[in-house]
Image (cartoon, grey):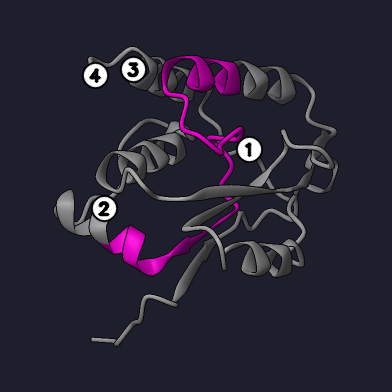
Amino acid sequence: MLKTTADDIIVTIDSDNTMNPYAMLDMFDKITTADVVIASRFVPGGRMIGAGYRAILSHIAVWLMRWRVGIPGISDYSIFYRAYRQDIIRKVFDHFHGKPVEGGGFSCMANLLIRIHMLVPNARFAEIPLVLRYDMKEGGSAVKLFRTTMGYLKMAFAKK
């Protein structure tokens, strides 16, 4: 088993050429004062290029999650591009018996943030701007529209 420290960072990123890997440098700077850093399309300087209908769906999902969940410091719940302190992920992993995420489609990413917020109420979330380049996407979409939509609705209206 590998030894880890509280300073270890886990970064997740899509592999479809839509996200600038150099944004990690900004994430590493920001994680010095945060536990989770999200590369966000919805903060000043962030946006989506070539997203088409996905942009509309993303805005609806963000509105729904802000309205129903409202975790401070988060505007982009579904993006995969994130940096986490490993001890935060370890707490979620251990508490949920090795299954840190749940949900259909991309809603699993929102589920992870909700679980972090639930287990570590004082967790600090931060965001950096991301220009998401759908026009640079390689390969087909992994989005399963119905599954993702149902996943968000289920989370948003779950009993608290």
- Vertical placement of residue 42 versus 56, above or below: below
Q: Which badge, 1 or 4, comes first in the chain's sequence? A: 1
The residue to which callout 3 is attached is 154
Q: Circle 3: is it few (<14), some (14-19), or many (20+) Cα within 10 Å? A: some
Query: Element type at marker 3?
Result: helix
Foreground disc of the pair 1, 3: 3
- Vertical placement of residue 67 versus 91, above or below: above
- Vertical placement of residue 48 versus 22, above or below: above
**Picture coordinates of residue 65 (x, y %)?**
49, 22
Which span of residues is magenta-colored? Answer: 61-90
The residue to which callout 2 is attached is 92
Q: CA distance from mark 2 to mark 4?
A: 18 Å
From the viewer's perspective, tell me whether residue 75 is left or right of residue 44.
Answer: left
Tell me the amino acid under the disc marked 2.
Val
Q: Which badge, 3 or 2, comes first in the chain's sequence? A: 2
**Picture coordinates of residue 49 (x, y %)?**
85, 36
The residue to which callout 1 is attached is 141
Foreground disc of the pair 1, 2: 2
